[in-house]
Amino acid sequence: MLQAGPTVTPILAFALATIPDVAGIRTLYGFAADIADSDVAEFALQRQRARSGEDGMPLHLQRIVAISWTLRLGEGIACHTGGDANTDEAALLQALFDQVAQHAPCVTSWSGAAFALPLLRYRALINGLALPPHWSAENATQSGLAPLPYATVPLDDMARLCGFPALPVVAGGTPWEAYRAGRLGEIRARCDIEAMATYLLFQRDRLVQGTLGAADYHDSVAQARGWVGQQAAPHWRDFLAAWPSTEG
């Protein structure tokens, strides 16, 4: 089990995967039970395009199906994905919130301010869950939230430009298509990699901001690489194989 060092602030970098909240869309628009889920989701997508010109589903109509986090405590690091393929959204959220409440880490995500943090609040509200103590998107500094300020740049692009491996591609193009095809495992695996990439870029951002020294940065990258090298899961083996040994 990971244990925090006495003077090291824990870091938790998380990633989310979502699909259209078909049940929520049915509730809002009164679709009959015999209307296919795919048609219900397509209605919401077309409505969003007509209203805003955007292809994405509105935040409050996105259901979380995977949450992964990379947690650094002292000299230890590990990446976890909450629950399993049968875990419901409320339990996934609670698993993340429990980690935050237990370790009081600095929490970061790639598109936190624009996507992940408001989404978590909406889904916590819908599921009737309490957020971790003092955690609010409006009070990020005091509550230990440190979303990376690069929401307009794809995580995969920035990871590759910084010398880290590319993120795995979910077959079918979108999490919704993969989910409908019964490939939640692929979604969870990509979520794992996103959480690790977010952690690595967070440490790199600290380096360029001057809050983390070069030696400590390289140590943190080596520590993460060492953990990945100990994993047997195929997505971690692929990630390691694509990781240039000269990164950093």
Image (spheres, helix red, strand yellow):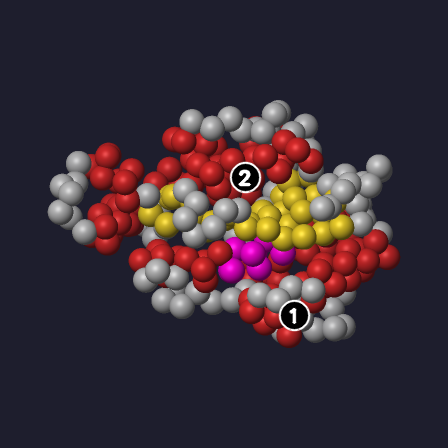
Give the magenta-colored segment's residue range: 189-196
User: Residue drawn 62% across and 38% down?
Assistant: 99
Amino acid carrying label 2: it is Ala
Element under label 1? helix
Q: Position of residue 220 (x, y in %)?
A: 77, 56
User: Residue drawn 32% across and 43% down?
Assistant: 21
- Determine the image quadrant of residue 183: bottom left
Q: CA distance from mark 1 to mark 2?
A: 27 Å
Q: Position of residue 198 (x, y in %)?
A: 62, 53
Q: Is residue 62 left or right of residue 130?
A: left
Q: Which mark is residue 95?
A: 2
Q: Say whether residue 117 is visible.
A: no
Question: Is 48 rendered above or below residue 219?
Answer: above
Q: Position of residue 232 (x, y in %)?
A: 62, 67
Question: Is 173 rendered above or below residue 8?
Answer: below
Q: Which mark is residue 240?
A: 1
Q: Say whether residue 109 is visible.
A: yes
Label 1 or label 2, whichever comes before in sequence order: 2
Question: Which one is in front, 24 or 147?
Answer: 24
- Determine the image quadrant of residue 58: top left
Q: Is residue 227 left or right of residue 24?
A: right
- Determine the image quadrant of residue 95: top right
Amino acid carrying label 1: it is Leu
Q: Position of residue 123 (x, y in %)?
A: 43, 35
Element under label 2? helix
Disc 2 crowd, CA 10 A, few/some/many (<14, 14-19, 20+): some
Q: How many marks?
A: 2
The verdict on residue 242 being magenta is no
Disc 1 crowd, CA 10 A, few/some/many (<14, 14-19, 20+): many
User: Residue drawn 84% across and 37% down?
Assistant: 6
The verdict on residue 191 being magenta is yes
